[in-house]
Image (spheres, rainbow, N blue to C red):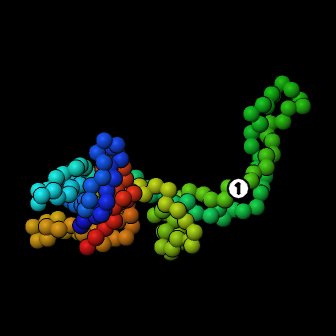
Amino acid sequence: MKLFCSTYTSPIDIEGTFTDVFIEDSIVSIQKSKKYLSVTFEMYYFKNEQKIVLDQRTLGFYGGSGDSETSKKAAIVSIPNPITEPYTEVIPNPDYNSEDPESLEFITVPITPSETINVALMQYLADNNGELPEVYEVVDFGYPDFNTALQFFNGGDRNNLDISIPNPFAKLWLKDSLVMKNQKVGSQFEFID
């Protein structure tokens, strides 16, 4: 698994620009009994055939379904709101005064629905036969737990040292979640085979 940027401009002003910069996994560690996986990534380029490391970051994943501690955070998507017409709702009156006979305990307020709503991605897919609407935006890619991360990354063992990410969502997640030099790598890097 490699990401590549032909002309990388560091977000750190004093560092400048580098050509032919790569990001790839350098260390994979699995602690099966603790349900812990970590993947260390290096950002580097070559100068006079010498590898120069610009940055190194480790992503850690732990826990699984039913565990009290887990790195899992739900992915959130913004979709068109199925409720499009204004409506009214009866709510408790915040200014209600029980000693005032004119005071109303409940009031009716008009509600204008927003154009979009945020929903948990996996729940939405489960409720809609695995289909997203035509128009949607990923608001938060979430974060996988140990079990899900094992599905994101293939390889990284003695039989296959190279890690690959076959899942398109996992690739988008990595480009959004891996931050190097205070910048999401997806802002400048693309996957290469």
Q: Which residue is more in the foreground, 100 or 9?
A: 9
Q: Which residue is more in the foreground, 34 or 136?
A: 136
**Residue located 25% across and 62% down the image:** 20
User: Disc count in the image?
Assistant: 1
- Residue 79 in the image, given as x and y percentages of width and height: 58, 63
Count neighbours of disc 1 (C-alpha within 10 A) and say few if under 14, some if 14 to 19, many if 20 or more.
Answer: some
Q: Amino acid at mark 1?
A: Pro
- Residue 102 in the image, given as x and y percentages of width and height: 90, 31
Q: Quadrant of the C terminus?
A: bottom left
**Residue located 72% across and 62% down the image:** 84
Q: Which residue is more in the foreground, 38 or 181?
A: 181
Q: Quadrant of the N terminus?
A: bottom left
Q: Which residue is mark 1?
A: 113
**Residue located 12% across and 58% down the image:** 48
Give residue 187's quadrant in the image.
Answer: bottom left
**Residue that protrudes farthest toward the right in the picture:** 102
- Residue 176 in the image, given as x and y percentages of width and height: 39, 57
- Residue 97 in the image, given as x and y percentages of width and height: 80, 28
Q: In this rendering, does residue 140 appear at all? A: yes
Give residue 14's quadrant in the image.
Answer: top left
Q: In this rendering, does residue 152 appear at all? A: no
**Residue located 84% across and 24% down the image:** 99
Q: Secondary structure at mark 1?
A: loop
